[in-house]
Image (cartoon, coloured by chain):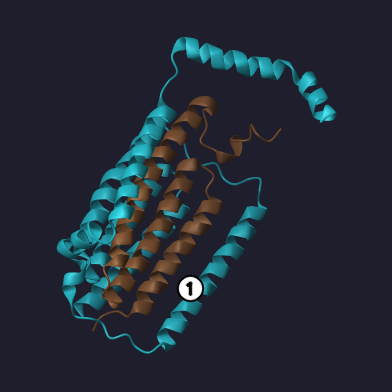
Chain colours: A brown, B cyan
Amino acid sequence: MEPSLAAYLALSGILFTIGAVGVIFKRNAIGMFMCIELMLNAVNLTFVAFSRYYSDVTGQLFVFMVMSVAAAEAAVGLGIIISFFRNRVSMDVDDASILKN
Amino acid sequence: MATSALFFLFAGLAIACAISMVYHRNPIYSAISLIGVFVSLSVLYVTLAATFIAAVQILIYAGAIMVLVVFVIMLLNMDEDKPLNRLRYLYAVGGGLGLILLIQTFFIFYAVMRAPKQAINEDVTVGNTLSIGSAMYTEYLLPVEIVGILLLMAVIGGVILVRKLSQPQMEMVVNSELETRNEPAESDDYRVAL
């Protein structure tokens, strides 16, 4: 007996929710970044689950695309975090307020 | 039966690791918990007969992205996240948003449960490397090329962002910054004139 499609979708929804709430609660930029990665992974799980239950390879292909985009995002995002840290000596996103005034 | 047991074991592990990631204030603990989530998701991909994606999940996420994240955490020598003292209303916003998302999730769960049962196809060749590779280089060639260009742009962008300016360039930037800061009156007049 295999777990049903609904079980995978529920797990994915729970992980996505945890990620979304984490983005709001976290204050440091790295923490928010990791929560976004978690949300991307939750979406990947739905792609793979549907791909399995409908026997279509397209879902897994797009998981591969999402992973590439996540890798690109990691490179650019961490670059931004490092240059932000150089200028402000802090990781707190509340300190990124130079455009406010 | 074994698949079911694996699913519930690793689904629980994934949720526990995700909660621990959000809960811990120390970025290193968060990163280690996130690696736990990635590994358990990889096992779940194996239960879905997607072996290629499972391997790539470990290679790219746990192997490349998280190494980069841990490297940056240690490079910047970050201290613990300060407790949320202002912006307290964000707790309410976050809790409300989370509740809405959870309700939505269980609505989807309910809808899928009510739908006619999808007979699972026993064809396990769908997830193997051969089928993914042949789809990738025939039907989906254009997206693959676009992803290649995206990765090139990310490499160039990353290098430019992290690059340290040489001394004359840095002085130029600092001087222009100082000039703009020393002339607030003029900029105000400019705004009034507009």
* Chain designation of label 1: B
Is residue B49 in view from this perspective?
Answer: yes
Give the labeled residue for mark 1.
B105
B168 versus B79 height, above or below: above
Left or right of B146? Residue B88 is right
Q: Quadrant of residue B13?
A: bottom left
Location of the N terminus of chain A (image quadrant): bottom left
Left or right of A97? Residue B112 is left
State the residue in front, A28 or B127: B127
Q: Tell me the SS state at disc 1.
A: helix
B86 versus B48 height, above or below: above
Location of the C terminus of chain A (image quadrant): top right
Which residue is found at the position 52% from the left and 48% from the top?
A26
Q: Could you say where residue B132 lies in the image, as x and y percent from the top left? A: 21, 62
Which residue is found at the position 41% from the left and 34% from the top?
B157
Which residue is found at the position 56% from the left and 53% from the top?
A24
